[in-house]
Structure formats: structure tokens, C-alpha cells
Amino acid sequence: MTAAMTKITHHLTDALLMAYSAGTLPEAFNLTIATHLSLCDECRARLGAFDSVGGALLEGCDTVAMADDSLEATLARITGATPAAAPRRKRVEGLPAPLADYIGGSLDAVKWRPVGMGVKQAILRTSRDATARLLYIPAGAAVPDHGHRGTELTLVLRGAFRDETDRFGPGDIEVADESLHHTPVADIGADCICLAATDAPLRFRGLIPRIAQPFLRI
Ligand code: ZN
Ligand code: ZN
């Protein structure tokens, strides 16, 4: 997927970019945000502004008195240390780099598990304070209508979906919170694959999804 395919029209909020820059978000959110950033020049530029504000704030802090030899000690550590090897990024065709590290292969190799109504998911391994999952919504199918107890980020990787608020295509990210109740429906023309991160269980209206959700961690 390339961002040039379609124009991204749904972006990260300032609050999320600020929290990402400050490093205060759960891993599942960082993954989803990093994946959007890898596709979106606009949000990368906005992040740059927040990063420099954070740096300026740090510089404004009171300095701590250092030992006389601290400069030499630091230099010795720098010159003496062997540089850490840069993490090897697996290059996977058609997959944003931040996500490729978590999937370990292409989207076609993902082991999907049924969620119901034809929708499938694959939970990615992240810290437990939030959950990251790939969602597979067959063309024309719907995710059961639900509300949110916390924040839900949904980034479109393939295809498109529509809900009560708008249409979301490749690269678009939807930021949902307690105020939104929605029923995402994949476009008729193509199956939709999304990366979704949640920090609290969803609020389903239907009985069957409510019974199933502890098993699905959704
Ligand atoms: Zn963006
Ligand atoms: Zn939702």
C-alpha cells in the first residue's frame, strides 16, 4: 500500500500526537500511530512541531550540577562503546514498516480467527494495557454496532469502511471515544483490513457479541 494511492483525509488528533511525542501511550497505540505516521506526511510534520516543543521544555528545566569529570566520562563512554546494532526491519511488500515487525509476514499470511458475522481478527502481541488487533471485514459486512469505554483507533490498511460519521479509506485513521456509537460497514467493492487499538472493552448492544467479547478480548 502506498499513501499516494488515495488522499488521507482522517488524521491523528493533537492530543494523540502530543502523547505519542511524550511517550506516554500504551504500545498498541504507539504501533497504530507509528503506522499512520509512516503513511502520512501531514501528521509527521505536525509531530515534528510537538517534538521540538517537548525538547524546548526539557532545555528550560533546571540543570543538575555535574561532577567535574562528567564530560570526560561521557566522552569515554561514547568512544569506548560499540554502537548498538540498528534493529533489523523486515521489509514486507505492501505493509507499512512499523506494522511489519509485529506481523512477521504479509497480510495474506495472517492467521485470522472468526469474531462473528464473517468478521475476523488477529490480536498482535503488545503490552496488556491496551490491545492491538488486525480486523478483516468482508466486503459489505458490518462490525456489530458498539460504543466505547475508552479510546479506539482504527487505521485502514486495505479497502474502506463507512460508519455514522464518515467514510474511511486506506491510510485514514478514526479516533473514537465514549461519545461515539457506531456500526462500521466495509465497502461493497472490496474486503477491508484495519489495524485497531483499544484501551478498554467495547460496549456492545447485542447479546451475542456481549457473551463472546471476553473470549475475543474485544
Ligand atoms: Zn495523518
Ligand atoms: Zn468502534
Image (cartoon, helix red, strand yellow):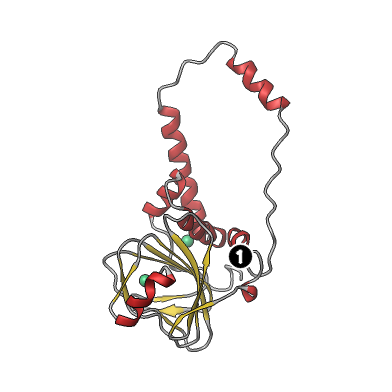
Residue nearest the observer in this picture, 93 or 108? 108
Where is residue 132 shown, x and y percent of the image?
Answer: 48, 63
Residue nearest the observer in this picture, 214 or 120? 214
Disc 1 residue: CB within 8 Å of ligand 1: no
Location of residue 3 by image quarter: bottom right
Quadrant including the C terminus = bottom left
In the image, 165: left or right of 50? left
* Residue pointed to by mark 1: 103
Where is residue 174 shown, x and y percent of the image?
Answer: 41, 67
Location of residue 112 by image quarter: bottom right
Quadrant including the N terminus = bottom right
Where is residue 47 shown, x and y percent of the image?
Answer: 47, 50
Q: Quadrant of ligand 2?
A: bottom left
Look at the picture and state if 32 lies above or below 120.
above
Residue nearest the observer in this picture, 77 or 213? 213
Figure disc tally? 1
Q: Residue at x 60, y 12 (%)?
A: 69
In the image, 10: left or right of 91? left
Look at the picture and state if 214 lies above or below 12.
below
Q: Residue at x 54, y 60 (%)?
A: 125
Most extreme residue toward the top, as rendered? 68
Dot 1 amino acid type: Ile
Q: Secondary structure at mark 1?
A: helix
* Mark 1, other Cα within 10 Å: few <14 / some 14–19 / many ≥20: many
Q: Residue at x 52, y 88 (%)?
A: 189
Residue nearest the observer in this picture, 6 or 146? 146
In the image, 115: left or right of 73? left
Where is residue 48 shown, x and y percent of the image?
Answer: 50, 47
